[in-house]
Amino acid sequence: MGYLQSITAPRDLRDLSSEQLDELAAEIRDVMIRTVATNSGHLGPNLGVVELTMAIHRVFESPNDRVVFDTGHQTYVHKLLTGRADQFGTLRREGGLSGYPSQQESEHDIVENSHASTALSYADGLAKAYAIQEQDRHVVAVIGDGALTGGMAWEALNNIAIAKSSRLVIVVNDNERSYTPTIGGLATALTSLRTNPRYEVMLEQVKRRLNAVPGVGPAAYEALHAVKKGMKDALAPQGLFEDLGLKYVGPVDGHDRAAMEQALTQAKRFGGPVIVHAITRKGQGYDPALRHEADQFHAPGPFDVQTGAEKPKGKIWTDHFSETMVELGSRRTDVVAITAAMMHPVGLDAFAAEFPDRTFDVGIAEQHAVTSAAGLAMGGMHPVFAVYATFLNRAFDQVLMDVALHKCGVTFVLDRSGITGDDGASHNGMWDMSLLQVVPGLRLAAPRDVPRLKELLDEAVQVDDAATVVRFPKGPPPEEIVAVDAVNGVDILVREGAEDVLIVAVGAMASTAVEVAAALREQGVGVTVVDPRWVKPVNPAVIELARRHKRVWSIEDNGVVGGCGAVLLQTMNSAGVHTPLHLRGIPQEFLDHAKRGVILERIGLGAGHLTEEILADLRATTEPQALVDAERGR
């Protein structure tokens, strides 16, 4: 029996010896490796914060002291140390543990932050609230894994620096850059001195007394201050943070638990905002992760524990986009690529390898990425910003005011649109089509299969006077769905029998719509299925088809409020088309994590459920004669 089973709360860590804690760290790594090998998830970041997280929970007293992680995907160790070890095998599975912090799971989780660069703002507010109420509580914000590249983090730092009474400890988990380490006893002494509350009092006294000396006093103080600061900056990369007015401790070896505990204890004692700079390595303790050149097993799929070899998988939508981008780059020298710290996940790594001078990774800074793209467009290039659909939410104002207002030819490629599943509520790309509907001039395409992805992306980059969007879901694409006809750019996928039901299928829902159509035909219902390809603006051909049919059903992998179906209804009304229209999409709620297919069935977007709904609607109104006959013949 290992030590992990005996850890029911963070306080249990204080009962273990140093040797036992080392064994616990090894056990935690083993549990995480074996779980992620089966369930998938974020492995590299969590392997890198084992000792760091243990140190935090030994020095601070969660949940009285609040620990906020940024980003939330580095909280597996935290989950294991806060009473969830026995459930860890359910990680990212339906009904099991979330891959991110979750208020529903534990009192030790306060922020469900799976989007980056937000923890410092949460922590700033928490610490101020506790200070106002004179509560004896600390707040620890763990930020890293690229999150400091986000502008929101620096906005928070700017405010934290002047909140002198906030008992806030910021742990910078630095796993991407290497700084020259501080060496020897002098550096340790300076760290202790800087975090001693008497230090500031002493400095103020020295400043006051020296400045009181006529003539040479002020100059002497400035010289002394310069020497002190010069020594510190030579010994540690702290200048930037201390220039903001924040106390700095480090760099500390984030894998040396004892050193981390000492640094955190000093920071806790200071009584104001302090930054503790921890140097860690993603994948620490697992050789296959450390050898993984791309991202140290940041978020691997299922893999072999012994070798680290990922299990074979077929090509996904992202792979096909990646190939298409390289083809476009070869034909169009004006095409440039932008990513927000997601080069491999969004498939731009192949483009970067071929065209490194035309590829820009701006870090976790989606707002900057969009406005920089506008500048590139103004300069004569055609930028393609590839981003997860959910992350474009963060840059909506820039899409609206910086790109669309200026009629810039920028293409946004939204990966993992619609239901993504395993990553939970924050990662479902269910907001983009609703948000983007309000952007004047923007054109939005939703390809149903790989050939349409290639066609629509090629069409999108030809638009040089407006924003264009191409969105596709997570996972493998369906087999090609060949159109039987086309009307003014709208693909007719099914046209059988009378014009009873028109199904407008948006993007990834096309294959479902075709399946529904087949079931309806078996019941004698005439059905037409169309794929608009470009869903914004609404194609007039769809309106004319709606005019001729008895019922219209709009099916989309997006929130029903303000989505494609809602806009279709508005457009039909404006055109005087009053055919009854039924909207089907994602309910406007935060969805629990599960596989994409499971969630689609649960929310009524499975083919069987949709078929029954359509048949029930037809039976409740004027029924097609074939359906009546079929019912009587049973």
Image (cartoon, rainbow, N blue to C red):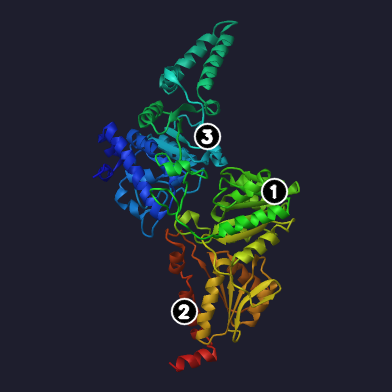
Asked whether the residues under the numbered discs 2 and 1 touch, taking CB atoms below 8 Å apart as contact, a structural biologist would say no
Q: Is residue 577 visible?
A: no
Q: Which residue is mark 1?
A: 374
For the point 63% across and 75% down, the residue is: 483
- What numbered label is drawn on residue 177? 3
Which is closer to the viewer, label 1 or label 3?
3
Q: Residue 104: x percent and y percent?
A: 37, 53
At label 3, counting other C-alpha atoms closer than 10 Å, the crowd grade (few under 14, some 14-19, many 20 or more) is few
Which residue in the rendered view is the most extreme toward the left? 1
Q: Which residue is mark 2?
A: 612
Q: Secondary structure at mark 3?
A: loop
Q: Residue 403: x percent and y percent?
A: 69, 51
Q: Secondary structure at mark 1?
A: helix
Amino acid type at mark 2: Glu
Q: Earlier in the sequence, mark 1 or mark 3?
A: 3
In the rendered view, would you say 573 is above or below 263? below
Q: Is residue 398 left or right of residue 477?
A: right
